[in-house]
Amino acid sequence: MAAIKSTKESLKVRLGSDLKFPIQGNFNAISGLELLLQDIQMLLLTLPGERPMRPQFGCNLRNQIWENMEDARVSGAASIREALELFEPRISVLAVNATSNETTGLITFNIQFIVNSTDTAVNLVFPFRVGTQLSFA
């Protein structure tokens, strides 16, 4: 049990800590892998130019929302990989794959990466709906 606790504390120190978003009347601190996943989600949902002090920060994924589904699938995967490699030094991206469902307009991005500080493999599924608005269905 002590080994598990020290591993969790080590993850907290290596990956940092912050507040859980969205803030809904209370402030919940998060750290470790949960913080890293939140930061990745924020990166992928931020368009370059939205942050005045970091105009290059973000991912062009949301620009694909009205594109042809196949184009959005291919260029979306490339945009995700590029953003993660440029702005997330805590991970090493292994692969970004995408599958699409023509009926629902949903593209599912499967992001595989390694957390550098712990050599932990993570598989993140990131859904994206084309032709409407972003959705986490």
Image: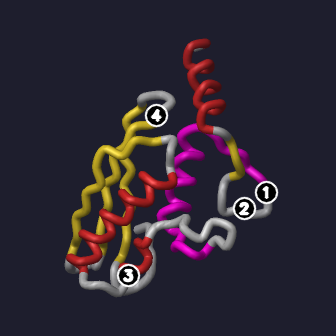
Tell me, yes or no, whether the highlighted magenta stretch contains residue 40: yes
Look at mark 4 in the image and give the residue it sits on.
116
The residue lying toward the viewer, choosing from 14 and 51, is 51
- How far apart, in angstroms, are the residues tagged by discs 4 and 2? 28 Å
The residue lying toward the viewer, choosing from 77 and 8, is 77
Q: Secondary structure at mark 2?
A: loop
Identify the residue shown where x is 42% and y is 52%: 85
Q: Secondary structure at mark 1?
A: loop
- How far apart, in angstroms, are the residues tagged by discs 3 and 4? 31 Å
Look at mark 2 in the image and give the residue it sits on.
23
Point out the tag, 4 or 2, that comes first from the N-terminus.
2
Do the residues bearing badges 3 and 4 touch, measured as CB atoms within 8 Å? Answer: no
Image mark for residue 65: 3
Do the residues bearing badges 4 and 1 touch, measured as CB atoms within 8 Å? Answer: no
- How far apart, in angstroms, are the residues tagged by discs 2 and 1? 6 Å
Look at mark 1 in the image and give the residue it sits on.
26
Point out the tag, 3 or 4, that comes first from the N-terminus.
3
Tell me, yes or no, whether the highlighted magenta stretch contains residue 44: yes
Q: Nearer the viewer, mark 4 or mark 1?
A: 4
Q: Nearer the viewer, mark 4 or mark 2?
A: 4
Residue at far top of view: 2
